[in-house]
Amino acid sequence: MNKIINKEHFSEKVFKLEIEAPLIARSRKAGHFVIVRVGEKGERMPLTIAGADLNKGTITLVVQEVGLSSTKLCNLEVGEYITDVVGPLGQATHIENFGTVVCAGGGVGIAPLLPIVQALKAAGNKVITVLAGRTKELIILEKEMRESSDEVIIMTDDGSYGNKGVVTVGVEEVLLREKVDKCFTIGPAVMMKFVSLLTKKYEVPTEASLNTIMVDGTGMCGACRVTVGGKTKFVCVDGPEFDAHQVDFDGMIKRMSAFKDAEREEIKKLGSPKCEITKSQHAEDRTAPWREELRKSMKAKERTDISRVHMNELDPEYRSHNREEVNQGLTMEQAQQEAKRCLDCVNPGCITGCPVEINIPKFIKNIERGEVLEAA
């Protein structure tokens, strides 16, 4: 467990937390993130490390209340403990002396941008930082950014502070007046998309730090997958930073919105001990006519006799000379065959054994009947 040493209220729903994590503080680099969990059955949340203090053995996280889990985290006070903080995870930011670099941050994305700005400045770059928010109250860490930047441009949607306009207005102002060698951008997905479109127009190489849905953070679940340059990448192990001009932002945004309705329902349950899937909910799903029909289609013994389907993999000789993904996934036919091995138990141990209590049987049975979208 990790103790909260300090808590600062940036705005109505944005908090800065300083947390005891000496091992992480010692090994983290710009761009790294951690997975945080509040409660033994809490959701796993990816949060980029905004700073570290080696002497105190602490790391800094900036969190915005968005859904149930982030609200639970923000409700913790100084002296209380976070159940788990795992990291550092992901690939560190590639830092070198590029020349002139523009760093564009929006909202809470400003926080993870700070260590990148600091590292770029230390490497000898001229750093021009563009900070954007809807209002003055949402511009965070300005003092720290100014200390490590040659210039800071402030943009607010309502013009309450700095210049009126969105982040791309500030970025283009710089691109029009001088040669920029590199751009880094962190913020809402739609913001990074338009920064990327702008810098592509001016042929400026750009790195975007992606903030996708994530579960395990080690590349096993595939929840954070994105398409980069036409290939599937995992944000947790291949990223979080990618060539922004190669990222399929539209696909990423669509995936990130998949659980909005469910999240709105869950936030209503804050304070209830029954946020997770309950046995009664599983029982209700299990009695659906299509589930009963599937169970009747095969005897349990027939299902247990089915051999396990092995994941398709690249040839060992081929993959020893490249870094392509080893596992190639299952064909639809293979997935359905593997799904038939599920007994659809009355008291499924796979649900109680899952750290976030995902309704695994429902997912598998939808695959068995060929309803891929229902399983997503």
Image (cartoon, rainbow, N blue to C red):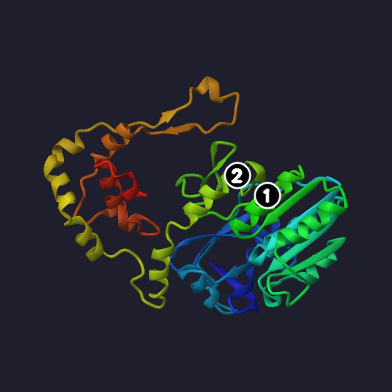
User: How far across and down, in percent of the image, does residue 330 sit?
Assistant: 37, 33
Question: As displayed, is residue 35 above or below residue 320?
Answer: below
In this rendering, position of residue 101 left or right of residue 338: right
Cβ atoms at labels 1 and 2 below 8 Å apart: yes
Question: As displayed, is residue 83 above or below residue 331?
Answer: below
User: Which sits earlier in the primary sequence, circle 1 or circle 2?
Assistant: 1
**Amino acid on which disc 1 is placed:** Ser
Q: Is residue 122 visible?
A: no
Instruction: For mark 1, give the secondary structure.
Output: helix
Q: CA distance from mark 1 to mark 2?
A: 9 Å
Report the disc number at residue 15.
none
Q: Residues within 10 Å of mark 2 (few under 14, many from 20)?
A: many
User: How far across and down, in percent of the image, does residue 290 sit?
Assistant: 17, 50
**Amino acid on which disc 2 is placed:** Val
User: How far across and down, in percent of the image, does residue 186 sit?
Assistant: 67, 57
Question: As displayed, is residue 66 above or below residue 117?
Answer: below
Label 1 belongs to which residue?
196
Q: Is residue 178 visible?
A: yes
Label 2 belongs to which residue?
247
Relative depth, front residue between 116 and 263: 263
